[in-house]
């Protein structure tokens, strides 16, 4: 039987006595162990922090999380914990980068070919307590001047911390001198905001129910109001015939091929989409089609009765003139009537 080594032939006389890898003279890890004799194993190494490559012609950074095929090798030990070295090649410049583990500080150390990017992690921030190592404590005990410097720094820091604590206490006593009044102010502000939120939520739900929209509506912004003010919708006729004619004219000459957009469902299988989602999708599609037709009816110059002037171009962000201004400008460009055309002679001299 082949067992787990499917695809690897083991002769019957060797079956159960030797593995397929030993029989073929190959390592179980394949090409990853081509330097196993030197104690090197190829692994996938992920950069633990951003570094600056020293081999590149221009300063380039290698971000955290970038992966490399690295050569892993044991180079030492910290007590009983081994120290490993990961050596990889930067594809951009061809330089080698070496990173080693630091079991003492539970970190990684850049050993060759790059420098760690300074992100401020090693700096002491406000409020943090610095824990000294055994070596530092021994040095303070043996060096009197170093101990004096540490005492002076601690006293200076204690003075700063004391002033800050007194300021916080003073502000807290001022704000909570009357807890009942402070609570009333908080509850009053929260109550007003809650009423506004409930009103906006009710208006949004009413709009969704009226328009049949099965999606969440974002709150209105000033940009939305400004852009909505630039839109002008066309006016349809009063009679049903005019409405039908305008709608027929607004349809595209070549209808879109919706066969590629609709999923093909075989007769033997049923759609897994819920009925409510199907109804919402149809309503949204009908609304989109209606808006597309109305927009084309407004923008298409061949569907409007008024002549389109060459100077009256639509510019983005500028409203068009409406009403009497457009009618007054259009009168100057109206063609002469039939009676005026008959009175006007074709030539300015008398015929024989």
Image (spheres, grey):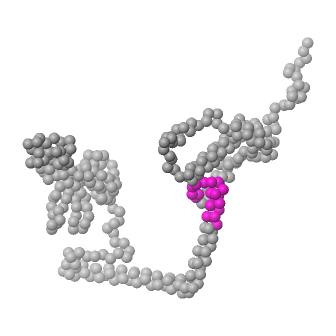
Q: Residue furthest bottom?
A: 177
Quarter of the image where one finds residue 248: top right
In the picture, which quadrant includes the N terminus?
A: top left
Q: Residue 205 lies in magenta, yes or no?
A: yes
Write the residue at 90% across / 15% down. Answer: 351
With 224 as the anchor, is 157 left or right in this view?
A: left
Q: How many marks?
A: 0
With 66 as the anchor, is 311 left or right in this view?
A: right
Q: Is residue 340 above or below residue 209?
A: above
Viewer-side residue, 334 vs 60: 334
Whether residue 314 is visible:
no
Viewer-side residue, 43 vs 61: 43
Write the residue at 9% across / 48% down. Answer: 17
Task: Please state the horizontal and vertical placement of residue 129, each as a whole percent of the image.
Answer: 32, 76
Write the residue at 70% across / 47% down. Answer: 233
Dominant secondary-structure state across the stretch colored magenta: helix
Q: Is residue 200 above or below residue 180?
A: above
Q: Which stretch appears magenta?
A: 199-218
Task: Please state the horizontal and vertical placement of residue 223, each as a whole percent of the image.
Answer: 61, 55
Quarter of the image where one finds residue 101: bottom left
Whether residue 181 is visible:
yes
Q: Is residue 306 above or below residue 134?
A: above
Task: Please state the horizontal and vertical placement of residue 12, each as a whole percent of the image.
Answer: 11, 42
Q: Residue 242 lies in magenta, yes or no?
A: no
Viewer-side residue, 167 vs 306: 306
Viewer-side residue, 299 vs 350: 299
Q: Is residue 82 above or below residue 32?
A: below
Q: Residue furthest top?
A: 352
Task: Please state the horizontal and vertical placement of residue 343, each as a whole percent of the image.
Answer: 90, 26
Write the residue at 57% across / 57% down. Answer: 216
């Amino acid at each position: 039987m082949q067992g787990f080594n499917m695809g690897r032939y083991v002769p019957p006389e060797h079956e159960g006595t030797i593995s397929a890898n030993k029989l073929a003279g190959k390592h179980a890890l394949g090409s990853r162990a081509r330097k196993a004799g030197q104690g090197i194993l190829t692994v996938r190494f992920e950069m633990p922090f951003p570094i600056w490559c020293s081999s590149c012609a221009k300063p380039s950074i290698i971000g955290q999380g970038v992966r490399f095929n690295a050569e892993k090798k044991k180079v030492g030990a910290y007590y009983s914990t081994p120290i490993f070295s990961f050596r990889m090649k930067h594809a951009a410049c061809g330089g080698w980068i070496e990173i080693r583990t630091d079991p003492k500080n539970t970190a990684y150390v850049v050993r060759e070919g790059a420098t760690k990017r300074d992100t401020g992690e090693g700096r002491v921030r406000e409020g943090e307590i610095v824990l000294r190592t055994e070596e530092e404590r021994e040095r303070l005990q043996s060096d009197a001047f170093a101990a004096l410097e540490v005492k002076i720094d601690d006293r200076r820091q204690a003075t700063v911390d004391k002033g800050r604590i007194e300021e916080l206490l003073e502000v807290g006593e001022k704000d909570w001198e009357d807890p009942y009044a402070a609570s009333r102010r908080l509850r009053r502000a929260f109550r007003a905001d809650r009423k506004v939120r409930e009103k906006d939520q009710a208006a949004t739900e009413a709009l969704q129910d009226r328009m049949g929209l099965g999606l969440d509506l974002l709150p209105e912004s000033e940009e939305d109001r400004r852009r909505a003010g630039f839109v002008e919708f066309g006016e349809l006729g009063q009679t049903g015939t005019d409405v039908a004619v305008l709608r027929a004219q607004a349809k595209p000459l070549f209808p879109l091929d919706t066969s590629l957009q609709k999923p093909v469902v075989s007769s033997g299988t049923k759609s897994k989409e819920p009925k409510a989602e199907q109804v919402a999708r149809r309503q949204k599609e009908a609304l989109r089609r209606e808006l597309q037709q109305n927009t084309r009816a407004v923008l298409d110059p061949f569907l409007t009765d008024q002549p389109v002037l060459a100077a009256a171009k639509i510019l983005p962000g500028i409203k068009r003139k409406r009403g009497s201004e457009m009618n007054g400008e259009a009168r100057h460009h109206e063609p002469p009537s039939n009676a005026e055309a008959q009175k006007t002679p074709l030539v300015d001299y008398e015929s024989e």
